[in-house]
Image (cartoon, rainbow, N blue to C red):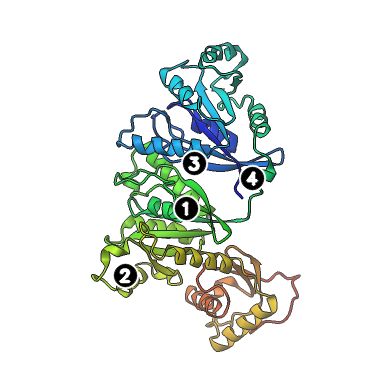
Amino acid sequence: MSNPQVVIIGRPNVGKSSVFNWLAGRRLAIVDDVAGVTRDRMTHTIEHDDRQFELVDTGGIGINDIDDLTTEIEEQIAIAMSEADVILFVVDVRSGLASLDEEVARRLRGIEKPVIFVANKTDADTLDSLADEFYRLGVKDILRVSAKQNRNKGQLLNAIVAVLPSGEERGEREPEMKVTIAGRRNVGKSTLINTLVETERMIVSEVPGTTRDSVDVRFQLDGKTFVAIDTPGVRKRKSVRQDIEFYGLHRAQRSVRRADVVLLLFDAGQRISQVDKQLCGYIEENYKPCIFVVNKWDLMAGQMPTERWADYLRDTFSTMWHVPIAFITGQTGKNVKKLLNHAQMLFKQSRERISTGELNRLIRRALEHHPPPLYRNRKPKVFYATQHAIGPPAIVLKCTNPKAFSASYRRYLLGVLRDQLAFGEVPIKLYFEKRSRDDERGEAIR
């Protein structure tokens, strides 16, 4: 069962995203003076007094979106309100009561759900009286807070927990795998998210850059819980001119770092771009399990065999030959379930542990089959190997001199590990460390 939903609503620029970040304790949503930055619903799991709930940020009610996405934003707000267990109605005491605040209050009158009225930007008790005019909206209680000054956060969290549905009604959250969906603009990331969750969870538009935040979307498949992370479409660095795009780029990178598995999307009808290469490089630098996903494959029916696109990817990303390739149509859902099942396989691979005995037997055979070349007229020695981490798997080889093992020889050993162990399609961290004098574990393997 899912966690209760606590939805933040209000007119534009009252500080909804600031309240979201403040309660989450992290800078998740983009905060900007430009109205309408938030478009899709953003979620984050909050825990307070042994209770968990999903905090949901929404776009501003009544916004006139510059990309003509007002209808889509309003639809997302309506869905969030319909799914909410608790609603936070946020207003701005500094700008005072506005006609759009009255519109928000009107929409809430027919909703039979707990509503907490939050007067934001009440930075000090000397400003408390400014919130009194909002009683005209028919509210009974006003909670005066300041996200900027960290005022009355505990009171707000206590008020939320006090009206949450009981744990028996909603159940506890299950373990989940985080899947980040990355790619350049308009490759179909949001469409794929909507297909996965089987609802219009993300705004889909032909307007480039529709998604501005990294958005977490929880869903279940075959009894297992997942978090799909939709990311802003990435542009060339020299094209990132606005603050919104700058923060979007950094959120996309952070979403890659958070991921258990990254789905890197390509448009079947377009050539691989410099942005694709930058994203792939960032994924590789962070040792993230990845699947190359060629989307919109239905548009290429009869025009190109899958082998040709696969070869194109292999030639372009020669250092990531272990990454599996999938061909899907996100809009219709073709091959999407197979894609997610494969992502689960990668997640499992990345968390495998190999016994020290098995690992050392494998390294011994590899050294015997292809000994390392001499280094300064000396034969390099490996004393033993051990796995010291998972997610990704990290292997440490204790040796006489780490510099004695060339890059090509390290690639050879990585290939052996992939071929012989359960790490065939995930990145492996391979470290060579000099054995310390007090480390007397065994003679040299070779």
Q: Which residue in the protein does label 2 denote?
A: 309
User: Which amino acid does the dot numbered 4 rest on?
Assistant: Arg
Name the residue: 54% across, 75% down: 405
User: Where is residue 395, by image quadrant?
Assistant: bottom right
User: Which amino acid does the dot numbered 1 rest on?
Assistant: Val
The first of marks 1 and 4 along the sequence is 4
The first of marks 3 and 1 along the sequence is 3
Real-space Cα separation, disc 1 to disc 4, in angstroms? 19 Å
| Left or right: 415 in relation to 441 | left
Determine the secondary structure under disc 1: helix
User: Which amino acid does the dot numbered 3 rest on?
Assistant: Met
Determine the secondary structure under disc 3: strand
> So how many labels did they put on this image?
4
> Residue 160 location in percent, x, y?
63, 32
Of the pair 37 and 372, the residue shown nearer to us: 37
Q: Which residue in the protein does label 4 denote?
A: 170
Real-space Cα separation, disc 4 to disc 3, in angstroms? 20 Å
| Left or right: 410 in relation to 73 | right
Q: Is residue 136 above or below residue 169?
A: above
Q: Mark 3, mark 1: which one is toward the viewer?
A: 1
Q: Which residue in the protein does label 1 denote?
A: 197
Real-space Cα separation, disc 1 to disc 2, in angstroms? 28 Å
